[in-house]
Amino acid sequence: LDISLDDTDTRVKASLTLTKNTQENADIVLNGENQTLLSVKKDGIELSQDDYTLTDTHLIIPNLAERITLDIESRINPSKNLALEGIYKSDTIICSQNEPEGFRRITYFIDRPDILSSFTTKLTGNKTQYPLLLSNGNPIERGDVDSKTHFVTWEDPFPKPCYLFAVVAGDLGKISDTFTTKSGRSVLLEIYTDKGQEERCWHAMSSLKKSMTWDEDLFGLEYDLDIFMIVAVDAFNMGAMENKGLNIFNAAYILADPKTATDSDFKNIEAVVAHEYFHNWTGNRVTCRDWFQLTLKEGLTVFRDQEFSSDMNVRAIERIENIKRLRNFQFPEEAGPMTHPIRPESYEEINNFYTATVYEKGAEIIRMIHTITGKEAFRKGIDIYFEKFDGMAVTTEDFVAAMEEASGYSFDTFKHWYHQAGTPTVSIEENYDPKKETYALSFKQTTPKTPETSHKKPFTFPIVVGLLDKQGQALAEKTDIMSEEIHTMTFSNIKSPPIPSLFRELSAPVIVDFTFSDQDLAVLMTYDKNPVNQYEAAQRLALNLLNPTILALQKNTPIAVPAHFLDTLGHCIENDKINLALKAEMLTLPSVISLVEPMQVVDYDSAIAARKHIVQSIATTHAPLFLKWVMKLSEKDFSISPESMAQRRFKNLCLSYLSEAGDEYLKLIYTHYKAATNMTDQISALSILCQHPSSETNQALEHFHTTWKDNALIMNKWIAVQANSSAATTLNNVLHLESNPSFDKKNPNKCRALYGVFAGNHAHFHAEDGSGYIFLAEKIIDIDTYNPSIAARLSTAFKKYKKLDKPRQAKMKGAILSILNKADLSKNTKEILTKTLA
């Protein structure tokens, strides 16, 4: 590739050497979109327009030769590329995004992941505007073209699919470090960002070095180039991209310091940097044969980054956060119109399949393989996988075969997870025999019909169960593999009826159907040695109260919160032996999403009201305890250690509860906002105040805007807390925010902060008058004209259409049809909404 970079007139010269791999006569069919073809040469001879066929999407060249060279020159305009796919302008820099099908916007090529090619890339650009010229691999030559122009040539020795190609050009600041691999090679590490932001990159650099060490220690995988680069850009459709040797990141997942980043930001940066680095092997060195295999790299790499985060932080808390994401995003996705197996059989637009199912459920499938094989066999399977397939484009079957070879276990029935959609429900019955002193659990799995098949074969999954006696003493733990519709697990030498701790660590991505008494759940909350299941017990205890409260509200019947429930939570609040982060999770009630998910007709109003009723009861009953903890956990020296993060997490949860105990606490929360020494405490207090509109709320919002209006990433937080507000004026506030200088509808981060967050604000998006639906539909119609990927993502907000009550369903349908009736609607958005109505 020879690319002469310019804001509006970038010239791309591509020289392709092709060898025919079939005896049949076949045309050369190259993908190409949104570019102007300037010339085509075959073996040095320029072709006329009669020698090839050019369409809006393809360049077709007749060919009979066994081996040819094509030289193709075309022109693209990065400044007008608002889809942010291919090469585009982001603020003052030129960058690229090619996964899954962006490379066809750069030049004409066979844009498929199984076409692995060696790339040598010469970048040429203006010295002043583009002093930095980056691409994949190692730099092998650089110099001046003339007094105003210079070039850099990059060579990537590893064949790769074109989706891993990357370009960055601009005037950026950087930080540098080195890493010495276990074999003694020195690797240069560089992170690039806007000038003035360099000091905010050191946490990302630390995360990168931790990732490199961890991957060597756990999997024996060393980095393979002389240089590893990360570039942070402001306008980016995704979180980050694993381009070979040149990762491009959304700036939100790189820039951090205590004053500007929350604890969640710090953890997300650590996890995403690790995820993209881990892709160097699980995705780059071994890649996907086709996009149906997307989970081959994403599910495996998410599992790897989850394990990394667990080793860097508190494992139980990381697992709880994984489970929450699964239940709040993946389970609803699988119960909605976009349901699909982790390896889908068909798609209209591959961008729509970068989903929680492919990523989060895909990671759960790998986690089950890890549980079934055991740690040592799993590592052996990874070794076999790379020994056999390094440098190749392969399938999920190839990965599973490596695990079979390593473990000796047959995964034939387990493979149903790859081909069948749906979340299994596992119903459990218990039977205690006092004469034989045996305790048996009978498991029965059922999975709802989904579009790809109505006849579901039984899934295979591990069941991890612990038993406690009524006093909370541990009795036993056992792991079984269930592969049939009904399975029985039996424990011997059990002296009295025990309490089961089911599916520990959520050993399989299933819905567990078992009736616990409140007394048994209180024992599990207090004494279970498995912290994840302590959390699960707290969630179930809350659900035992929330579900009847929802029914009572629907019947307009008042319901009191039982004293034993409040007492159990009180003991949890006071218990000094529980990790504060775990305590915060245990005291956080199930989400509105998890409450409405089982409903035949979703009732957001009752779910929100029931949750608020119980929160207020907890708050008023235990306000003195919450206040005591707030005073005890005053900030000393800031740290991002797990202990310090846990203290801030629990303190801010206490403040949230106090806000529900009475307006008299709002001044206390405003005081904490003003006194905050870090962004975690500041934005937490601001978020709480936004749920309780008051003079303090207005003062805090104005102060925050004045303080941070020049920082784009922080202003996204300011926008988001307002879009998520429970205030009656929220929609009007959102409309007003559109005209704020801090908002730019062309920037994906801004769209997610305003429109994406509003779409998740159940009270206002699902307003009875349909105003939320109409508002979002108008935004999707507009955004679809320049960024179909973001428009399609926003369209998933309508996924509950079929389960709404009739009046809301009619209003949402009208909004959806207004989008579908738009001329030239992208296939991205059309696919989502057509499936929603189907």
Image (tube, rainbow, N blue to C red):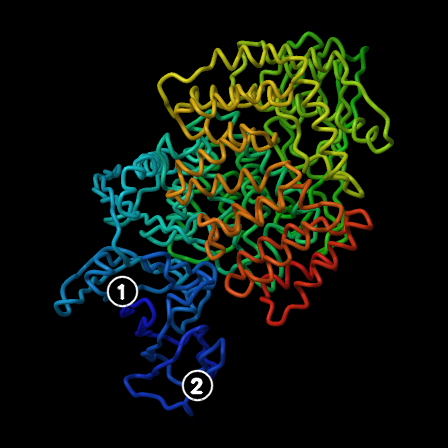
Q: In which quarter of the image is residue 369?
A: top right
| Residue 759 image offset from top left, x and y in percent | 62, 47
Q: Distance between the residues labelled 2 and 1?
A: 26 Å
Q: Which residue is drawn at 73% across and 25% down?
A: 613
Q: How crowded is mark 1: few (under 14 residues within 10 Å), some or many (20 or more)?
A: many
Image position of 389 (left or right of 439): left
Vertical placement of 803 versus 101: above or below?
A: above
Tag 1, which secondary structure? strand
Q: How crowded is mark 2: few (under 14 residues within 10 Å), some or many (20 or more)?
A: few
Q: Which residue is drawn at 32% across and 66% down?
A: 7
Q: According to the image, label 2 marks what residue?
A: 62
Q: According to the image, label 1 marks what residue?
A: 120
Is residue 479 in sight in this rendering?
yes
Image position of 605 (left or right of 205): right
Vertical placement of 735 versus 17: above or below?
A: above
Is residue 358 in sight in this rendering?
no
Vertical placement of 471 versus 19: above or below?
A: above
| Residue 825 image offset from top left, x and y in percent | 60, 68
N-term mark: 2 or 1: 2
Nearer-the-camera pick, 760 or 322: 760
C-beta proximity under 8 Å, tags 2 and 1: no
Which of pointers 2 and 1 indicates the residue nearer the eye? Answer: 1
Per the rendering, the mark at residue 65 is none
Q: Which residue is drawn at 59% across and 53% down?
A: 794
Q: Which amino acid does label 1 sit on?
A: Thr
Image position of 307 (left or right of 483): left
Q: Quadrant of residue 10?
A: bottom left
Tag 2, which secondary structure? loop
- Placement of the N terminus among the 4 image quadrants: bottom left
| Residue 183 image offset from top left, x and y in percent | 24, 39
Nearer-the-camera pick, 257 or 166: 257
Image position of 445 (left or right of 53): right
